């Protein structure tokens, strides 16, 4: 396991993995009991930040509001990749307005996993327009690979 070096091939492998529509897992912690909480998430990566669609009434958001530090683990599904995993660590920020931006960002995230037609389904549309919908933005302070 190592922290990200400056090798171009390391960066290229990380970018390739983060561009893939694989499930990630976000870890938060209950600030009172310190109990870890890990859940799968869909995400989008823009080269600097990880964007996650979520809802205000989820446990991960409640915990992140009290303790904005988290870790996100991303593993490739292709066993031929040079990386086994990437961990992004840092503090999140919440994007709650404007609603049009939330919908636009979430649509990009959902399209990665559902395709352009899948985003149009009634279930996906209900997620996009849910009043509890928000975006979690993680600009990692630390990236670990192995």
Image (cartoon, grey):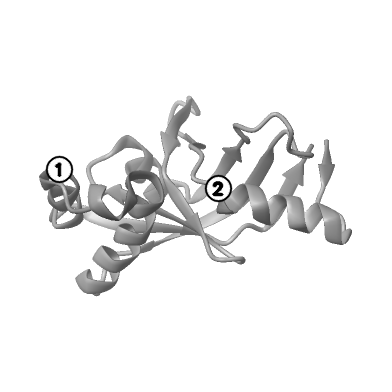
Compare residues 112 and 127 and report the one nearer the observer.
112
**Residue wearing tag 2:** 20
Relative side of 53 to 11, left or right? left
Q: Please state the horizontal and vertical placement of residue 105, each as a whole percent of the image.
A: 34, 64
Asked whether disc 2 touches disc 1, contact meaning CB atoms under 8 Å apart, the reply is no
Work out which quarter of the rendered image holds the N terminus and state it.
Answer: top right
On screen, residue 94 above or below 143: below
The residue located at (56%, 42%) in the rendering is 72
Q: Please state the horizontal and vertical placement of residue 30, each as a whole percent of the image.
A: 43, 33
On screen, residue 141 above or below 57: below
Q: Earlier in the sequence, mark 2 or mark 1?
A: 2
The residue located at (51%, 39%) in the rendering is 22
Compare residues 15 and 34 and report the one nearer the observer.
15
Relative side of 128 to 142, left or right? left
**Residue wearing tag 1:** 123
The residue located at (20%, 55%) in the rendering is 128
Which mark is on residue 101?
Answer: none
In space, the residues marked 2 and 1 are separated at their CA atoms by 23 Å
Task: Give the class, few, some or many, for how many residues have Cα within 10 Å of label 1's Cα (few <14, many ≥20).
Answer: few
Callout 1 secondary element? helix
Q: Please state the horizontal and vertical placement of residue 144, each as a whole percent of the image.
A: 75, 45
Compare residues 118 and 69 and report the one nearer the observer.
118
């Amino acid at each position: 396991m190592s922290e990200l070096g400056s090798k171009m091939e390391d960066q290229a492998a990380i970018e390739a993995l983060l561009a893939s529509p694989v499930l990630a897992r976000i870890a938060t912690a209950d600030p009172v009991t310190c109990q870890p909480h890990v859940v799968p998430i869909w995400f989008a990566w823009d080269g600097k930040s990880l964007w996650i669609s979520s809802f205000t009434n989820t446990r991960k958001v409640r915990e992140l509001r009290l303790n904005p530090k988290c870790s996100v683990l991303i593993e490739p599904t292709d066993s031929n990749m040079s990386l086994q995993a990437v961990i992004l660590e840092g503090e999140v920020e919440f994007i709650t307005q404007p609603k049009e931006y939330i919908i636009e960002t979430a649509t990009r995230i959902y399209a990665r996993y559902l395709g352009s037609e899948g985003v149009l389904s009634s279930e996906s549309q209900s997620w996009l327009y849910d009043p509890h919908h928000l975006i979690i933005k993680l600009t990692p302070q630390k990236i670990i690979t192995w």
